[in-house]
Image (cartoon, rainbow, N blue to C red):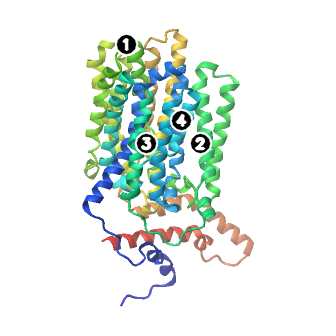
Amino acid sequence: MLPVPSEPKARMLSPAQTLVDGKIPQRHSTARRYLLLVVFCLAQFLDAFNNSALFSAIPRLVIDLGMSVSESTWIISAFQLTFASFLLISGRISDVYNPKTAFIVGVSGLGCISIGAGFVQDKITLIVLRALSGIVEVFPESNEQARAIGVFGGCGAIGNVLGLIIGAIFVEFASWPWVFWFVALVAIPIGLLCVFLVPQPNRGIDEPQHSRWKSLDVVGVSILTAALILFIFAVTSGSSSGWGSALVLAPLVIAVFMVAAFFYYETVIPPAVAAVPPRTWFLPNFSVLFGMALLPYLWWTTIFTILTTLWQDIYHWSVISVALRMIPIGALAFAASFSGPLSRKISPKYVLLFAQGLLVIATILLALADSPDKYWKMVLPAFVIGSAGAMLTYTHTNIAIFRTSPSSMAGTIGAIFNGALQLGSAVGIAAVSSIETSVEEKNGDPKGYAGRAAAFWFLLGIIGVEIISLLVFYRVEAEHMSPNKTQVAADEEKGKVEVEDEKARVETSEGDSPVTESPLEDSDDFKKVNVQEGDHEIREEFIG
């Protein structure tokens, strides 16, 4: 007979009954499970395709809709910005609402909005629809991504390659709207298939609708999204309106205050609701790895954006020819996506430093590749070296960030990591485009390579900052801490001052009465952390 636990322990173990309900989880057939894997990988494919296919279409699309260089940046940034912001509450949506319904609505909504985008003949409407696509975009669950990172990374790489080629075929032999309609042709059938294929999750007692809505950090995410939109608007307007103009300074200042307001707001709402709980920044190596996550998509997006326009508009290469020359990027990314086992023998810190070294070499080569005849001797080697470095950065940042994160925060950490990937690209590409445009206007030569070279040198500077942060702030010893210890370390680091202040307040209010325990021990947050850790232990024991 099992011993009767004490009261604190009972509180810690009680959630297990709710989680499993005394039942063995339903086991599905092997065929169905592999079919589900294919469906979820198609979702990752759609994510990659939805961006890369547009790179081939942007030069033609800019001409048809009469867009400037800075305006064309929004075609990519609008999608990635809204995707990154709403990704922060994606895990919570799956928790409080039916994840099957959320997935089906998301993938079907992406298809329907893509149909509308294909019929658009106005640049503002197209940008708005791209932003809506980012909100309903499909992405894999964070826990599954951590366990099968190679599979999903490989599907993303394939989506990038096929997106370039299929997008080029549509632009060359049909028209650019077919890029959007193809997304709809893939997304809507996936949504219909999931209605019958995805199993219905087991649910306990449903929360009232108003309680579910309150558990989502809609206010925080909205503040962050608005701030980033204003920031990108200011950066993209600087080259044309002047950096000292009110059109640039006003949104820039407002954006800074709104970002500060977002982080303050996250500290005053319950941690379980916050999109970015403050304690996450105190997890070992988290801040460094968050910075690393900003880089991979930015590097790829910069390459695609700068070179597709250069090769089509200046070098007059065909759309198909441009797409074929980009294939090495996807091929090397696919190969490097299977490098995960390296982290078992080598610390992610040293793998990431090696990856940054590859990116340094590749970016220097691209900055010097100022003529069409340098593709084979400079651009192609840069694609091979740089794409491998970017995928190594993506893969091993993901591995490292989950290695030192407690399981109770896996969903939050995964959402922040994936949001950082998109956020780095959205904000970074705006800065890169602004630098390119400013240099071209200063030199009076929009067809020259000086502006593009300046953009690559700026990218090299970002990589240099990443290298310094890895060398100075990344702690290898933190990789060997258990996830629960990292949770405690983060809470102690964040709460140390708060606990001392609280004790002082109690001592002052009670006079000479001794303080026997921290007042925080009876708080809901303290209990919640212990319950989550105990629940993690139960899950491991149950599965084992």
Q: Nearer the viewer, residue 232 or 496?
A: 232
Q: Residue 225, which numbered label? A: 2
Residue kind at label 3, given as amino acid type: Ala
Going 60% across and 30% down the picture, which residue do you hit?
233
Answer with mark 4 or mark 1, whichever residue precedes in sequence: 4
Answer with mark 3 or mark 2, whichever residue precedes in sequence: 2
Secondary element type, mark 4: helix
On screen, residue 521 versus residue 468, left or right, reads: right
Mark 3 vs mark 4: give the one in front. Answer: 4
Going 46% across and 50% down the picture, which residue do you hit?
286
- Label 3 – label 2 distance at C-alpha: 19 Å
| Rendering coords of residue 136 (x, y %) | 50, 46
Q: Tell me the crowding category of disc 2: few under 14, some 14 to 19, or many 20 or more residues within 10 angstroms, Cα based.
A: many
Figure check: 51 above or below 537: above
Q: Quadrant of residue 229?
A: top right
Quarter of the image containing the C terminus? bottom left
Q: Nearer the viewer, residue 270 or 285?
A: 270
Question: Can residue 14 be seen at all in this image of the molecule?
Answer: yes
Going 39% across and 20% down the picture, which residue do you hit?
367
Q: Quadrant of residue 32?
A: bottom left
Residue kind at label 2, given as amino acid type: Thr
Q: Are marks 2 and 1 in contact (CB under 8 Å)?
A: no
Q: Tell me the crowding category of disc 4: few under 14, some 14 to 19, or many 20 or more residues within 10 angstroms, Cα based.
A: many
Which residue has dot 3 on it? Answer: 293
Which residue has dot 4 on it? Answer: 78
Which residue has dot 1 on it? Answer: 315
- Label 3 – label 4 distance at C-alpha: 19 Å
For the view shown, which residue lies furthest in the top direction?
444
